[in-house]
Image (tube, rainbow, N blue to C red):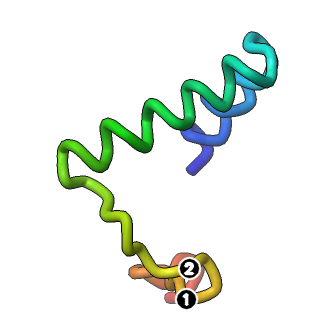
Amino acid sequence: MVVEARIFNDMKSHLDEVEFWAAIAHLHTVGLSKGKITAKMPPPEKWQIKRPFGKI
């Protein structure tokens, strides 16, 4: 998560708003075309952590 957050923060620092959202749209399109994401993903309130971090 930290690496991804850093990448997005760097993108926000180096790109203007139009370029940033164009990059996000491009990533979404590529994810759809490769089958890595679907158009019918659950809404964020339904997301769950698959592994309980911090629990022993």
Residue 24: percent from left, percent from top: 56, 35
Seen in the image, is 38 located left or right of residue 4? Answer: left
Single out the residue that lies furthest toward the top: 14
Single out the residue that lies furthest toward the left: 34
Amino acid at circle 2: Pro
Distance CA(mark 2)–CA(mark 1): 6 Å
Which residue is the site of mark 2? 43
Q: Secondary structure at mark 1?
A: helix
Q: Secondary structure at mark 2?
A: loop
Seen in the image, is 14 located left or right of residue 2? Answer: right
Residue 45: percent from left, percent from top: 64, 85
Q: Residues within 10 Å of mark 2 (few under 14, many from 20)?
A: few
Residue 10: percent from left, percent from top: 71, 21
* Residue at x-position 67% and y-position 17%: 19
Q: Closer to us: mark 2 or mark 1? A: 2
Is label 2 in contact with label 1 (beta carbons under 8 Å)?
yes
Seen in the image, is 15 located left or right of residue 34? Answer: right
Which residue is the site of mark 1? 46
Residue 34: percent from left, percent from top: 18, 44
Amino acid at circle 1: Lys
* Residue at x-position 60% and y-position 77%: 44
* Residue at x-position 56% and y-position 40%: 4
* Residue at x-position 42% and y-position 80%: 51
Seen in the image, is 34 located left or right of residue 4? Answer: left
Q: Residues within 10 Å of mark 1 (few under 14, many from 20)?
A: few
